[in-house]
Image (cartoon, helix red, strand yellow):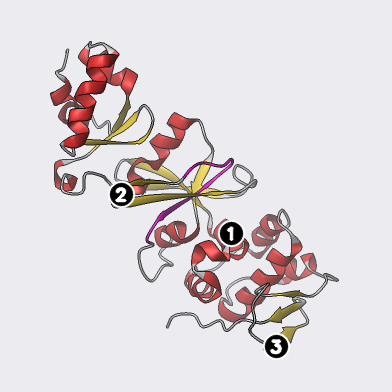
Amino acid sequence: MVLRIADLPDALLADGQPWFTTQEAAARTQRGLGAVHLGLSRLRRAGRVFSPAEGFYVVVPPDFRSWGVVPGEWFIDGMMQHLHRDYYVGLLSAAEMHGAAHQAPQAFQVMVDRQLRDRDCGRVHLRFVTSRLVGHVPTVRRAVHTGYVTVAAPETLAVDLSTFPERAGYWSNVATVLRELGPLDGAAVARIAAQQPVPVAQRLGWLAETFHGQVDLAPLAELVRGARTVLLEPGSRVPILTTDRTWHLRVNAVVEPDA
């Protein structure tokens, strides 16, 4: 059935299709691209659709029309398929999906294989973190309102937190997430950490031993055997509080996880 462009969002929602491309809109409405772009502009101004990537549109259900956007996990999978990019939800956004975040993160954090510009869609702030390990570390598929998304496995998340502490609110917040993450597979953690510079494993080992306690750290300790001693927080002016000889780590930051 040929649709008017104005009827497209409701028709797609009725079909269980939460997003669409410009070409799909043209096919469903049998209109030229010029008319389609004009009609989609009207729908965007009305808060009925939004476009987080060129040529890719997300339908806004009636109960989110005041937002003009839907949560990031509802559309990130479709968006990344549209862009032909490998990804997984990571860092604090993954922590929230694993039930290990005290509060909702202010941005929706996504790990990508190559650099991708950050973008803001109303109140949804997409922040992309480039990692060469995307596509080479364990992930899980999690059900969301619109289907499924790829999320860092807990072991991958633990390593990423130690790799990108500045993206996770620094060490006290990293410790908070680790403490709430639940049991981890120590061998898997070591395999993932082995793909990063050794200091990542040193910092993670100390944090996990101090604040987590639900992981066999022997494989990770073997990974750092004989490593040179490094600082927990490079560049910090905080005096060295202690030196951990197992992890070859000088602790020069006050780490206080939330209660």
Q: Which residue, given by chain and number where applicable, does mark 2 sit on?
A: 71
Asked where in the image residue 45 lies, by quadrant, the reply is top left
Q: Which residue in the protein does label 3 denote?
A: 242
How many discs appear? 3
The residue drawn where x is 66% and y is 82% is 252
Q: Are marks 2 and 1 in contact (CB under 8 Å)?
A: no
Q: Residue at x 69, y 59 (%)?
A: 193
Residue situated in front as seen by the camera: 177 or 37: 37
> Which amino acid, by three-letter code, is at mark 2?
Pro
Q: CA distance from mark 2 to mark 1?
A: 23 Å
Q: Is residue 201 left or right of residue 2?
A: right
Could you say which is closer to the camera, residue 116 or residue 153? 116
**Residue 76: % across, % down:** 40, 42
| The magenta segment | 106-117
Q: Secondary structure at mark 3?
A: strand
Give the answer, above or below, for where 15 lies relative to 230: above
Which residue carries the number 1 mark? Answer: 160
Q: Amino acid at mark 3?
A: Thr
For label 2, the SS is: loop
Distance Cα–Cα, label 3 vs label 1: 24 Å
The Cα–Cα distance between marks 3 and 2, rounded to whole angstroms, is: 42 Å
209 part of magenta stretch: no
